Image: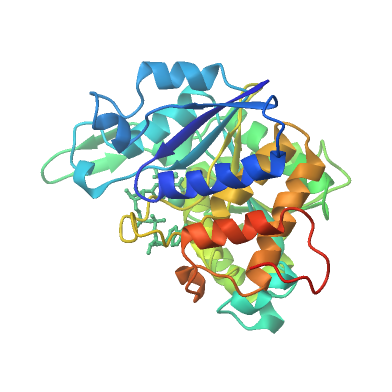
Amino acid sequence: MKKIVVLAGDGIGPEIMDSALRVLGAAMGSDSSVFSFDHQPFGAAALAIGPTPLPPATLQACQEADAILLGAIGDPRWEKAPFTPEQGLLALRKALGLYANIRPIKVVDAVLHLSPIKETIVKGTDFVIVRELTGGIYFGDKAEELDSAYDINRYDRVEIQRIMRQAFRIARTRQKKVLSIDKANVLATSRLWRRIAEEVAEEFPDCQLTHQYVDSAAMKIMQQPTAFDVIVTENLFGDILSDEASVLPGSLGVLPSASHGINGVSLYEPIHGSAPDIAGQNSANPVSMILSVVMMLRESFQMESLAETIETACFDTMNAGILTKDLGGDATTDAFTAAVIARLGGMQDGENVI
Ligand code: NAD
Ligand code: IPM
Ligand code: MN
């Protein structure tokens, strides 16, 4: 039995988690002996019942899990609390050593028409953002006073080496092209980043390494998204560029991610947040969470055929025009989920499900 810890979190987190677990349950059919699900409080949901967004029991369950599914955290009501939900998320990533956040940006033909960008530009978009997740400005020394504040951006050799190696390993399974994005014309950390990228590239002579400044890369992601294969970048740039890249497939609500640690457990979560503006309305797009489950099946459990069945059902549903509001449709979260489940059996061409 594989132990999955479920952190549904806040806002739309519980809604999309419920959808994804229903899809997974339906895909497993009567076989209930493969996974166990352990729901734990996290984020504002944990602050509502205790002093911390990451309770010790939640952390311990995560440390003992075979995989972790996270919905989203964040709640405007806790923005000014001494401990915020966001601090809980950062503490969890750090405690589990989840340094490699993999954010695939893929626009499959079936959903090409949903992109606000011209089809001629976006067709064939298929790249991966490898975001460093436990270092940089997020975790450096910081101070906040009434009239001044600072955040230190610091990277050490080992932190850069391991994320670079991860990027090259992924590139080897793809087109073997790594683009390292930095701001080496201004930042010392970026110059170190670039130097170590060059060193690590020598371990992967079959792959090609190029560099680009983050400002011009941000432009090129919209202008020529098909030019990218594997992007590797520091924590803050990866956060920003991946939300930008969500415009390509048409919504933040369709992008999943995987976070891997040194040897331990991996965590799977959408790239978006708790979307308080639409929480509780049964209108969130659950695709990001369903595809996060798909990533978990592939990357933690090597269950390729189950992963493919769910992924195909999800894209077929979108292709059939069943879409949530963020993609211009009127399907509720529940209706979309039901439509995916209805397609799980392997639909024949022309068969009319829903
Ligand atoms: P957000 O990602 O929650 O939402 C941005 C916009 O995208 C909103 O208009 C929202 O409605 C929409 N959106 C996001 N996911 C969607 C989905 N699945 N379906 C349909 N629409 C979707 O960003 P925000 O509003 O800036 O942040 C809200 C809260 O989430 C904040 O507290 C923030 O700190 C937190 N946050 C958490 C995570 C995480 O848990 N990993 C990630 C980002 C932001
Ligand atoms: C993300 C989020 C988080 C981040 C926040 C909520 C701390 O934006 O997962 O992308 O900045 O990493
Ligand atoms: Mn983000």
Residue 341 position by quadrant: bottom right
Res. 53 in view:
yes
Res. 165 in view:
no
Q: Position of residue 93 (x, y in %)?
A: 48, 31
Q: Position of residue 43 (x, y in %)?
A: 34, 35
> Considering depth in this image, is 206 or 271 the residue closer to the camera?
271
> Considering depth in this image, is 251 or 124 the residue closer to the camera?
251
Q: Residue at x 56, y 41 (%)?
A: 21
> Considering depth in this image, is 251 or 201 the residue closer to the camera?
251
Q: Quadrant of the N terminus?
A: top right
The mark tally for this picture is 0
- Farthest residue, direction right: 206
Q: Is residue 101 above or below residue 57?
A: below
Q: Residue at x 49, y 57 (%)?
A: 334
User: Quick check: 292 left or right of 348?
Assistant: left
Structure colour scheme: rainbow
Q: Is residue 6 above or below residue 137?
A: above
Q: Position of residue 53 (x, y in %)?
A: 31, 29
Of the four image quadrants, the one with ligand 2 is top left
Q: Residue at x 70, y 44 (%)?
A: 27
> Considering depth in this image, is 107 or 98 the residue closer to the camera?
107
Q: Is residue 311 above or below residue 95?
A: below
User: Quick check: 237 left or right of 127?
Assistant: left
Residue 84 position by quadrant: top left
Q: Quadrant of the C terminus?
A: bottom right
Q: Position of residue 155 (x, y in %)?
A: 51, 34
Q: Residue at x 87, y 43 (%)?
A: 205
